[in-house]
Image (cartoon, rainbow, N blue to C red):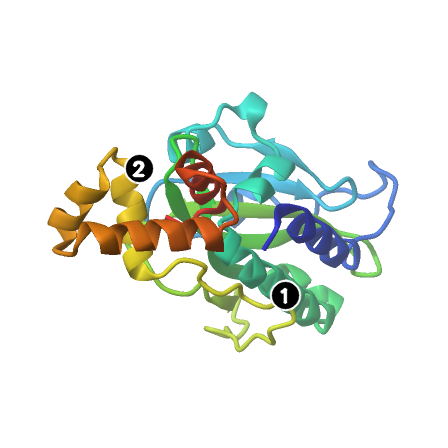
Amino acid sequence: METELFNTEASKIWKRITSDVPRGQLQVEIDLYKKLLNFFQAGDYFYWIFNLQNFCLDMVSDEMTAVLGYQKAEFSLEMLMDAVHPDDRPYFLNFENKALEFLSALPIEKLMKYKVRHDFRVKAKDGRYVRLLHQAIIIQHDENGQIMRTLGFETDITHIKPEGKPTLSFIGLEGEPSYINVDVENVFTVSKELLSKREKQILLLIMEGKLSKEIGQILHISKQTVDTHRNNMLAKCNAANTSELIVKAIRQGWV
């Protein structure tokens, strides 16, 4: 999914769950420290406060640099959205849309008794993709139940879940029931794999500087077969040459 479309659709969803309440009119309704105890961390993590009124992050913890490699000065909501793996963007939008439906159906007194949990991949500063377990709770809402701020924890679970589809769960706190691996309507479609498994193997070897003859020897196929795959990839990706193909592959997360 293209970045511009992804950001536009995410903004539409978040706008439906917030209200335009003047800052300072309401007090934060919980002690953040107590809420931290509701999160089990299975790896390195960082946390933030998401302001849904201004569509920005009020704060990001220092641990973000250790997890993703970015400096705090260069990290923002827009940067994060741009870094989400293209294949995970439809899942992300479908999960946020489902979370909106779930939270909207809750009585106001139960809004802060649920944790939304799902996972997605984000490109770190060094170019690798990190799978984050996203856990979020509401920490401020108005008298009508319109959400103002959420506290989010992002845990690196790449070592636990290196592959597989993202999943969504709603975790009940203070005795509320939990809903695990929630079935989500595909409002936003998941893009099909553009490159085949063999093409990705060849592209990775190309990125290592290998020539077609060398790639053929490594994969036990002929040089002609390698060249055919190279030409097919150029056509599929609408790339003028190998260099452009590599740039597109890195930016789009194809390899």
Residue 211 sits above or below residue 252 on the image = above
Q: Is residue 115 visible?
A: no
Q: Is residue 143 visible?
A: yes
Most foreground residue, 210 or 173 = 210
Residue occupying image coordinates x 76% and y 42%: 27
Q: Position of residue 247 (x, y in %)?
A: 45, 36
* CB within 8 Å, label 2 to label 1: no
Q: Amino acid at mark 2?
A: Met
Residue occupying image coordinates x 13% and y 48%: 218
Give left or right: position of 109 versus 220.
right
Q: Which mark is residue 99?
A: 1
State which tag comes first along the sequence, 2 or 1. 1
Q: Can you tell which of label 2 and label 1 is closer to the viewer?
A: 2
Q: Position of residue 43 (x, y in %)?
A: 33, 45
Q: How many marks?
A: 2
Most foreground residue, 212 or 17 = 212
Residue occupying image coordinates x 40% and y 38%: 242
Which residue corresponds to mark 2? Answer: 207
Q: Position of residue 156 (x, y in %)?
A: 37, 46
Q: Amino acid at mark 1?
A: Ala
Residue 13 sits above or below residue 132 on the image = below
Residue neighbourhood size for the residue with mark 2, other residues' Cα within 10 Å, grouped as few (<14), some (14–19), many (≥20): some
Kindly state the secondary structure of the residue where label 1 is placed.
helix
Q: Which mark is residue 25?
A: none
Kindly state the secondary structure of the residue where label 2 is placed.
helix
Most foreground residue, 199 or 109 = 199
> Residue 9 appears in which quarter of the rendering?
bottom right
Q: CA distance from mark 2 to mark 1?
A: 39 Å
Residue neighbourhood size for the residue with mark 1, other residues' Cα within 10 Å, grouped as few (<14), some (14–19), many (≥20): many
